Image (cartoon, grey):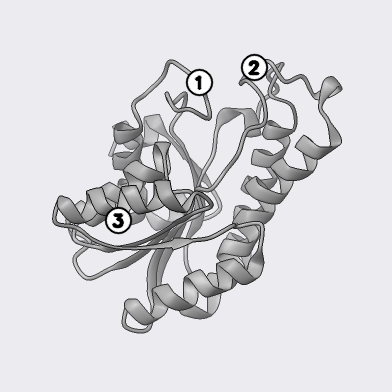
Amino acid sequence: MADTMDGATVVVTGASRGIGEQIAHAVAAGGAHAVICARDADALDAVAADIREAGGSVTAVRTDVRDEFDVERLVELATREGGGAIDFVVANAGVYHGEPGETPLSEETYAAFDDHLRTNARGVFATVREALPHLADDARIVVPTGVVAREGYPGYGSYAVSKAAAEAVARGFAAELDVPVGAVDPGQVETELSGDGGREPEEVAEMVLWALRDADPAALDGGVLDWGDYRQR
């Protein structure tokens, strides 16, 4: 693929902070039109203002990925603004109820369990499903994930369950679609959601940009690309 994303339309969910915010900045800096969403409209608008100030192209749409009708409106707007197709989707929106490492599954509330699944897994499903009619022929879909989706660590509760489900959603779509759908695991990241320590969100955004633009589509499709894959590029 080309070294830039000039003219591409990229949908990024959960873009009001953390990794999603930096992904939005990265794709806009690469020449794409970023269509970004989150539940916090004020924070989302602030991200969009920063992107415009830096010379990027962006549309901000307040969206709750738990609501498929919200997601439907998001992708329809992205399609209109993108001239008829969406080139890339980053299904990044996620929540964590509690403190990372301090939410044992045995003590998880039903409300937290349900909302983790609704946002982190069903939200990915809704984002991909609603985007399907609008995808370009060479589109790519990326789902950020973490090692807790595949390995058991104490204290990550239903958040880990939801990330495992999100990976399963990506694999299922990968098996059925003609475009690559895969997950990206950047390792520990320092964000409000995941806590202190780890890589900076800006570094992770560059990894996601690589997965969208340059990674081997066969490796991405149905797989999980990690930091080692990125370093060996």
Residue 1 image point, x, y percent: 24, 61
Q: Amino acid at mark 1?
A: Gly
| Residue 32 versus residue 45 in the image, above or below | below
What is the count of numbered marks? 3
Label 2: element kind: loop
The dot on residue 195 is: 1
Mark 2 or mark 3, which is nearer the start of the sequence? 2
Residue 52 on image: x %, y %: 20, 56
- Of mark 2 and mark 1, the one earlier in the sequence is 2
Q: Nearer the viewer, residue 54 or 94?
A: 54
Which residue position is annotated with label 3? 213
Indicate left or right for 30 with 221 as reference: left
Measured as percent of width and height from the top left, residue 41 is found at 46, 53
Q: Seen from this angle, which residue lies furthest left?
A: 55
Q: Residues within 10 Å of mark 3 (few under 14, many from 20)?
A: some
Q: Nearer the viewer, mark 3 or mark 1?
A: 1
Q: Quadrant of the C terminus?
A: top left
Quarter of the image where one finds residue 97: top right
- Looking at the image, the residue that sits furthest to the front is 42
Residue found 66% across the figure and 57% down from its top: 66
Name the N-terminal-most of marks 3 and 1: 1
Q: Which residue is mark 2?
A: 101
Residue depicted at x 36% and y 44%: 21
